[in-house]
Amino acid sequence: MTSYDVAMRAALDEAREALASGDVPIGAVVLDADGTILGRGHNVRERDADPTGHAELVAIRAAAGVVGEWRLTGCTLVVTLEPCTMCAGAIVLARLDRVVFATYDDKAGAVGSLWDVVRDRRLNHRPEVVSGLLAEESRSLLGDFFAAQRLG
């Protein structure tokens, strides 16, 4: 068990919350340097009719509210799917130290698959990236959701 397993399981629980409300099952948590969860989030695009209602942004906003500022230096974002360009930009802007994600998103990923926004040398901040943690569990959750969408 890695040091982020518990956090990824919390993110997977958040993804199931999104699923329960009819949204794409993606969940995220933000940890402080000690591993305490500062913010939680899951996709709320459908519920809130908000195109920016991605799990990562919800969790980052919640963590910033707890910290009391927008800089999340020393913090880690743990998310069930590779962040998109919008979320990767938010990760850089929030000054997160690292992003840990379960599975790659070959259609919209911006942390190594289609793009690699967070490690672009032209930017002033480049967080560490850890990928593949509990990937199969995340892929299964997403696969079941999209299979049900195709049948419905």
Image (spheres, helix red, strand yellow):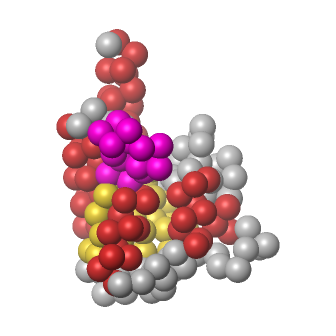
**Looking at this view, is 134 or 33 the one in front?**
33
Quarter of image, res 45: top left
Quarter of image, res 24: top left
Question: Is 90 situated left or right of 11 in this image?
Answer: right
Q: Is residue 16 visible?
A: yes
**Looking at this view, is 21 or 115 the one in front?**
21
**Which residue: 31% across, 58% down?**
41
Quarter of image, res 89: bottom right
Residue 98 in magenta stretch: no
Question: Residue 137's x, y, as percent?
Answer: 32, 45
Question: Is 92 situated left or right of 54 in this image?
Answer: right
The correct choice, above or below, for 51 with respect to 101 in the image is above
Q: Which residues are magenta?
A: 42-55
Question: Residue 56's x, y, as percent?
Answer: 42, 59
Q: Quadrant of the N terminus?
A: bottom left
Pick out the residue farthest to the right: 122
The correct choice, above or below, for 139 with respect to 58 in the image is above
**Which residue: 32% across, 29% down?**
144
**Which residue: 64% across, 66% down?**
118
Question: Residue 99's x, y, as percent?
Answer: 49, 68
Q: Quadrant of the C terminus?
A: top left
**Which residue: 31% across, 87% down?**
34
Q: Is residue 26 visible?
A: no
